[in-house]
Image (cartoon, rainbow, N blue to C red):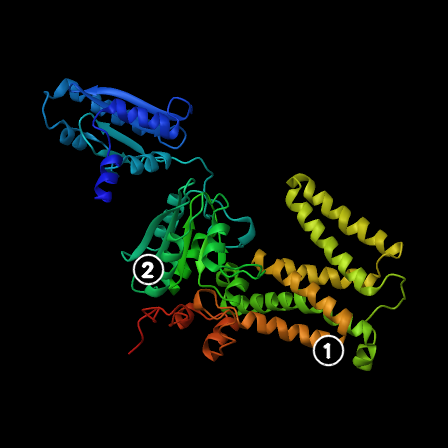
Amino acid sequence: MTTRKQTTKDAIDKNLDDLERYFKERIGLGTSFDIGNRKIVVLKKQVQLYYVNGLVESLIITNIIKELVNLNDHEKPTHKIYELIENRIIHESVEKVKTKDEMVDQVLSGLVAIVVEGEQEAFIIDVRSYPGRQPEEPDTEKVIRGSRDGFVENIVMNTALTRRRIRDERLRFEILKVGERSKTDVAIGYIKGIANPDLIETIRKEISSIDIDGITMADKTIEEYLMKQGYNPYPLVRYTERADVGAIHLLEGHVLIYIDTSPSVMITPATLFHHVQHAEEYRQSPAVGTFVRWTRFLGILASIFLLPLWFLFAMEPSMLPDKLAFIGPNEQSDIPLIIQLLIADLGVEFLRIAAIHTPTPLATAMGLIAAVLIGQIAVDVGLFQSEVILYVAIAAVGTFSTPSYELSVANKIIRMTLLIFVAIFKAPGFIIGTTIYIIFLAQLRPLNAPYLWPLLPFNPAALVHILVRRAVPGALLRPSIVHPRDRFRQPPKS
């Protein structure tokens, strides 16, 4: 009985004046200048269109209105006017809704609603034309060779970029709305028959259960609800702005999450090694790709362990063999070495943040001033020792060579933590800190996927695939971490 009353209350009014009054009270029709309402008469029946200026394609609306008005000149009045209008709506995407709440949601999403006097259904026409930029190469994932298109802030364009690369009839994009007030479109992308149904259901359930007024921060808000990350600095999903990277992960069996207004697509599940891959490795030959990958791994390891190790050897010179006795500061300073390292490391972070907030034409000049003047003057006045600047710079370069921005910042936090451990406990501090770090990573299981796979649990075949860039004809199996329904990328040879 309660459901029936609610349905009657929410049903679209047959009297269009009542419906117009509802729109005035509900979404500010007549108050908000961008809420549009066009009234026309078709065969002695009132017809109204509701839309939001700036989110719709005006030319299409004009053509639809022209087609409906022309009915007055070519048709006779009939009681089947509703069916007649339905057949004259010149658009490929038309659906019907029966409640005012659905109608309001669709209008605020950028669609056009057409209602006919005496009917309790509304036609919803998808004529969205969101403001935004055209696809271009992402700044954080540039390649020397390869496509120059990337995801943008329009979810429809992002799914289209993916479909352009995967023309499989089993590719699915399930649309959900998140946010009581923002009603943001969120799409779950996967290939049916490859992706794990349990993973899809888990993601669908978690996203559907999000109860918040709005997700204006888009992907990051969804990630925090989905992964329940807390204060863990390490990224539990991988972000990409490249359509080709998203497509290859779909073919591997991953599930992608597209959020309207965000140019970044979330790849789930993701392990630590997903964050250290880059598209450039696959745009080169396997030998060159492997060399680039190993160089990147070396840079990432240097960004974490180089400074703590150098600081440890500087504090305990007896641990070094005679041939490496030159490692460590040659001069004494009144400022403790740990303070120098922390200040210098934070200084690099200051410069990175400043570069983000500095207009592009000034960023280069600022970098030159920081690198040449500040560093040299700091050494000359005795604030830093020259070796400190050297090793901090090497660690910073390793940080910038990390493909994932989120991973690079997390590694910086771990590096500074290890420095503090070494300062307090020396060699045992480095060992204890490194052990805690590895255990911390090993216990992470984002969406039930071991974070250090294939290292822990050990999978030798998959680990070789991580360390060596395999040729595409030799990569026959999809990664087992996603539990694909179809394990074979290519049919096995008989």
Can residue 387 be seen here?
yes
Nearest the eye: 36 or 70: 36
Report which quarter residue 298 is drawn in: bottom right
Indicate the secondary structure of the residue bearing disc 2.
strand
Q: Quadrant of the N terminus?
A: top left
What type is the residue that disc 2 sits on? Ile
Count neighbours of disc 1 (C-alpha within 10 A) and say few if under 14, some if 14 to 19, many if 20 or more.
few
Nearest the eye: 39 or 189: 39
What type is the residue that disc 1 sits on? Pro
Marker count (numbered): 2
- For the point 18% across and 32% down, the residue is 86
User: For the residues carrying marks 1 and 2, which lies nearer the camera in this image?
Assistant: 1
Name the residue that disc number 1 marks.
Answer: 428
- For the point 54% across and 59% down, the residue is 230
Report which quarter residue 432 is drawn in: bottom right
Q: Is residue 34 above or below residue 106?
A: above
Residue 13 rendering spot, x and y as whole percentages: 23, 29
Residue 36 rendering spot, x and y as whole percentages: 35, 25
Residue 264 rendering spot, x and y as whole percentages: 48, 50
Residue 478 rendering spot, x and y as whole percentages: 39, 69
Q: Which mark is residue 102?
A: none
- For the point 68% across and 69% down, the residue is 305
Can residue 196 be seen here?
no
Q: Residue lying at the far front in this picture: please name it.
A: 1
Name the residue that disc number 2 marks.
Answer: 191
Nearest the eye: 237 or 480: 237
Q: Is residue 88 above or below residue 6?
A: above
Indicate the secondary structure of the residue bearing disc 1.
helix
Which comes before the other along the chain, label 1 or label 2? 2
Q: Quadrant of the C terminus?
A: bottom left
